[in-house]
Image (cartoon, coloured by chain):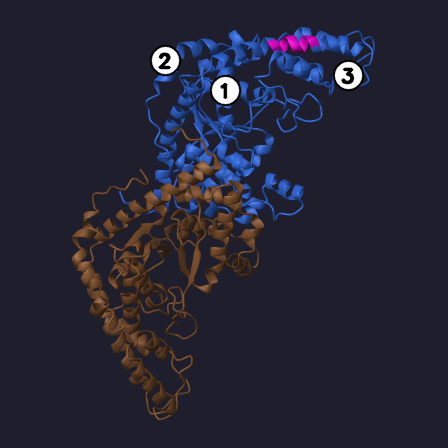
Chain colours: A blue, B brown
Amino acid sequence: MHNSFSEQNIGFSAKNKEKTDKNNQPESFLGQNSSTQDLLDKSHTKQSIKKKRILTGDRPSGKLHLGHYVGSLQNRVKMQNSHEQYVMIADLQSLTDESFKSENILEIMKDYISVGIDPEKTTFLLQSQINSLYELTFYYMNLVTLGRLERNPTIKEEILQKGYKDSIKAGFLCYPVSQSADITGIQADVVPAGKDQIPMIEQTNEIVRKFSQQYNSNCLREAEILLSDQPKLVGIDGKSKASKSLNNAIYLSDNEKTLREKVFSMYTDPDHIHVHQPGKIEGNVVFSYLDSFYEDKEHLSELKENYKKGGLGDIKIKQILFESLRAFLTPIQNIRLQLKDEDMISILKNGTYNANIEYEKTIQEVRKSIGIYSFD
Amino acid sequence: MHNSFSEQNIGFSAKNKEKTDKNNQPESFLGQNSSTQDLLDKSHTKQSIKKKRILTGDRPSGKLHLGHYVGSLQNRVKMQNSHEQYVMIADLQSLTDESFKSENILEIMKDYISVGIDPEKTTFLLQSQINSLYELTFYYMNLVTLGRLERNPTIKEEILQKGYKDSIKAGFLCYPVSQSADITGIQADVVPAGKDQIPMIEQTNEIVRKFSQQYNSNCLREAEILLSDQPKLVGIDGKSKASKSLNNAIYLSDNEKTLREKVFSMYTDPDHIHVHQPGKIEGNVVFSYLDSFYEDKEHLSELKENYKKGGLGDIKIKQILFESLRAFLTPIQNIRLQLKDEDMISILKNGTYNANIEYEKTIQEVRKSIGIYSFD
């Protein structure tokens, strides 16, 4: 049956707890990222307070890259200490844009674990295996009008891009409804997201209010958006944010040769032709990456001053960035090498099993509120 | 859990088989309906041929009436012999028009059984309890464009009626997709329906073809519409078809007093004031009902001739119709009186359990075709 996950493998994460915990120490593989360490320390002191539930996740559209690390992964490594964290691999969402590949699921799990998202602290779940999501989506569709969905900015942009709405898939139009099911089904208090995702949370909370009013029920809760304070990491071409589809990203799993090639092909300052000339920092991809990954902020300020004055060459700063990223990625990749497919499956299966229990609680309440007949 | 129906009550229908079979003899309660008998005899000879699967059903929006009997119920009593018949109580569809009342489910089951739909020959199922329908609907939404759904004549009419489409619920727009899940999930060969339902079957078969092409799969089959040759039964007011919402229908469960009141208030020929005057047959509700329920067709022709010539009064023909309907309804109501709620629940629960097995086969194939990850 579809959602009948066995509990037989729950032992895995416990067995490997010691190893995983050690690996999660930021000193061992995150370099000297003092801000991450600060936040980890702070969050540890909060553990006695009742933790809020957080839902986050990714579409399995490919391996994760440094843009994901800066934008979300590093935050998850922190949040798992201060929050009850659920990380969803949103394979159903991938169906709407036809980017779906089930083999990406294992790669993403390895990315998660290797950067330090700890299955002892975080529940991983596979969206398609949460049976009640389909049902919740179905019910919520009766609470949302066509006009409201078409006014969603993401949908509006897609309609504009395509020039006409005839080719928009119903599944795409309704995917904010499906996201609302993801969020409300797990009873998330907090959803970390970028500014562009504000309409998605608004749609979710509208559905919650409509449901509460229509069925005179309080079984669903509104969620809060946790806006990221991190700017999006730029792609190596400097043209837009790092992304798989634009082929301008450095992957967590890129080997040394690829890393070197990508760093040395980075867009810098096209007018900075000779070492002695003054160079620009703004729009210079190398400095953007150094801002995110170079730990010694004081030295970084000096480097910037020297670059602006003239006398610091692109090759030199690229070499510094390369070393810095290599130091960051090597321990992550060393962990990744030790990760076995079957263990990734176990972790995801167990997490999905546990998440299903939570979603099942919600759907039971939802059915009762609507008045769905039950044979039991 | 949601779709885990126990098998413990399967004994019910077997235990009552003898009684039910006897009750199903059309002679015992359908009067001398020779055409029904003819068709039953014909269909019996077909039983050695592999039976086609048929899906039909009703929204649980209220008790069933004579319009349902003429339009579908009498056909189901026949089809259950020649086909492998599934009758779905479509409670999810009721959610889209907010007519949903779960208490109607038992009343409709009693209507079904009392007119002779036999749980030994027909599988009854409750739509909301078929888990895979939600999931199938979800997948199919990615195969249908917004433009295609908006061109559906039923939806178009609703949009016209409301004057603007902003208030159309997404669930209403997408309900042809959900119907496609009902039909394809059970692998129906045949769907009996009126002409107005042709677009629904076309949408279903379009989804099947799109699925087959996109996923290179042949796990879904196209369905054939079986157009009803019965004209729709008119309401007692003569203005439109018999319907619950227009309050112009005679219910299968109406008592003698109500039946008499309704028959004697029927619209006839407003110009036929005196008995001796000639009367009109066209648009005369009493003769419409006699066409459907008066067995002696020869005598009916004579009555019509006399009415047209003049000399046959409205009270006389109403009395004939009343007697005729009373003779038709009394044995049905006698059976209904014997039906127990718990037995209706058992029949529906067992049928739903068995139907779930069939739907589950389909969803497994669908998941495999799409490439949905499985932990098993």
Q: Position of A254 compared to A12: left or right?
A: right
Drawn side of residue A268 relative to residue B361, left or right: right
Q: Which residue is mark 3?
A: A280
Q: Which quadrant is home to the C terminus of chain B?
A: top left
Q: Secondary structure at mark 1?
A: helix
Q: Nearer the viewer, mark 3 or mark 1?
A: 1
Helix, strand or loop at label 3? It is loop
Whether callout 1 and callout 2 share a subunit is answered yes
- Residue plotted at (47% across, 12% down): A338
Q: Position of residue A47 (x, y in %)?
A: 42, 16
Q: CA distance from mark 3 to mark 1?
A: 35 Å
Tell me residue A343's x, y (percent). 42, 18
Q: Chain of mark 3?
A: A
Residue type (three-letter) at the residue carrying disc 3: Lys
> In the rendered structure, does residue B204 fall within the stretch colored magenta?
no
Which is more toward the observer, A215 or A322?
A322
| Circle nearer the N terminus (2, 3) | 2
Looking at the picture, tell me which residue is in the foreground, B31 or A155: B31
Image quadrant in which you'd find residue A197: top right
Q: Which mark is residue A15?
A: 2
The quarter of the rendered structure image containing the N terminus of chain B is: top left
Dot 2 lies on which element? helix
Residue with the mark numbered 1: A112
Tell me which residue sits at (29%, 45%) in the image: B353
Q: Earlier in the sequence, mark 3 or mark 1?
A: 1
Q: Going from the N terminus, do you reach mark 1 or mark 2 first?
A: 2
Amino acid of disc 2: Lys
Q: Chain of mark 1?
A: A
* Relative image position of residue A365 (x, y in whole percent): 35, 39
The part of the chain drawn in magenta is A319-326
Q: Nearer the viewer, mark 2 or mark 3?
A: 2
Distance between mark 2 and mark 3 Cα atoms: 51 Å
